[in-house]
């Protein structure tokens, strides 16, 4: 993986994590993602 690709993926991870954390608490509980935001962001950017 190139350095530039690594930087882009890290940025995508941080952006995704920020988006998930900015969801209303009620929505996070309804979608069952409360407390698992980092894991979900990692899976969405880097795969399983």
Image: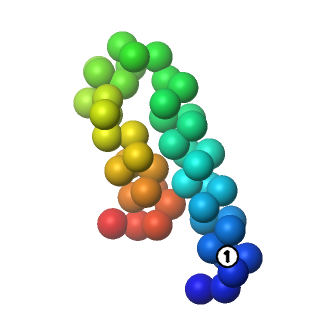
Q: Give coordinates of residue 42: x percent, y percent.
A: 43, 57
| Relative horizontal placement of residue 23, taking residue 40 as reference (left or right) | right
Viewport quadrant of the N terminus: bottom right
Residue found 67% across the figure and 76% down from its top: 5
State the residue lying farthest toward the bottom.
1
Q: Where is 5 relative to 9, above or below?
A: below
Residue on which the image places disc 1: 5
Local packing at callout 1 (Cα closer than 10 Å; few below 14, some 14-19, many 20+) is few
Quadrant location of residue 22?
A: top right
Q: Give coordinates of residue 20: x percent, y percent.
A: 49, 34
Quadrant location of residue 10?
A: bottom right
- What color scheme is it? rainbow
Residue found 41% across the figure and 46% down from its top: 38
Q: Give coordinates of residue 25: x percent, y percent.
A: 39, 16
Viewport quadrant of the C terminus: bottom left
Q: How many marks?
A: 1
């Amino acid at each position: 993986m190139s350095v530039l690709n690594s930087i882009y993926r890290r940025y995508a991870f941080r952006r995704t994590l920020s988006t998930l954390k900015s969801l209303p608490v009620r929505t996070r509980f309804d979608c069952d993602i409360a407390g698992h935001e980092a894991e979900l962001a990692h899976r969405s950017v880097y795969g399983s």
